[in-house]
Image: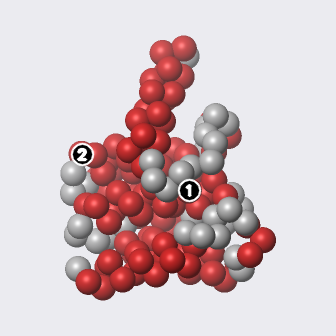
Amino acid sequence: MKKGLMIITFAAALFGSTFASANEVSNTDLKKAVQVYTESLKHSNTGIIESTIFNIMRMKKQYADVDYSAASTQMEALLVNPPSEIIRYKAFIAINYLENPERFPWIEEISPEKSAEFFHRLSEKLIEQLAGA
């Protein structure tokens, strides 16, 4: 448990303040962040998993060209065997965003303090898109 929290804390400290300025983070650091987040998706604590999914989406918004395939693959595993239904739901939304960001042009900057509001807004927009299709 402590190791998982330390990993999340490390990733958040490393990237939390730099999301605003993409030029300050090296490709090596971005790859390491994706690795750390991918491992965090395997954690037994659902709060850590939810936070990780949200942070991966924040990272994708800021660093669109980074390879998120490992994180996406791990989230696909969460669709099959989720620790909770909310994790399955958030993983589904995140996978769609990672694979098709052009379908989400209305996503603006993602505030780290508003995870629940962000997913609520995403689900409302997805329902609107499905209803209009």
Estimate the x, y position of residue 120 in percent, counting from the top left. Answer: 41, 35
Residue in the image at 28% along x and 61% along y: 47
- The colour scheme of the drawn protein is secondary structure
Q: Which residue is mark 1?
A: 58
Which three-letter amino acid code belongs to the residue tagged 1? Answer: Arg
Residue closest to the far top? 132
Q: Which mark is residue 127?
A: none
Q: Is 133 left or right of 18, judged from the image as shown?
A: left
Q: Which residue is mark 2?
A: 85
Judging depth in this view, the residue of 100 and 119 nearest the camera is 119
The answer to whether residue 100 shows anywhere in this view is yes
**Element at label 2:** helix
Residue in the image at 40% along x and 81% along y: 7
What is the total number of numbered labels drawn onto the structure image?
A: 2
- Quadrant assignment for the N terminus: bottom left
**CA gap, disc 1 to disc 2?**
22 Å
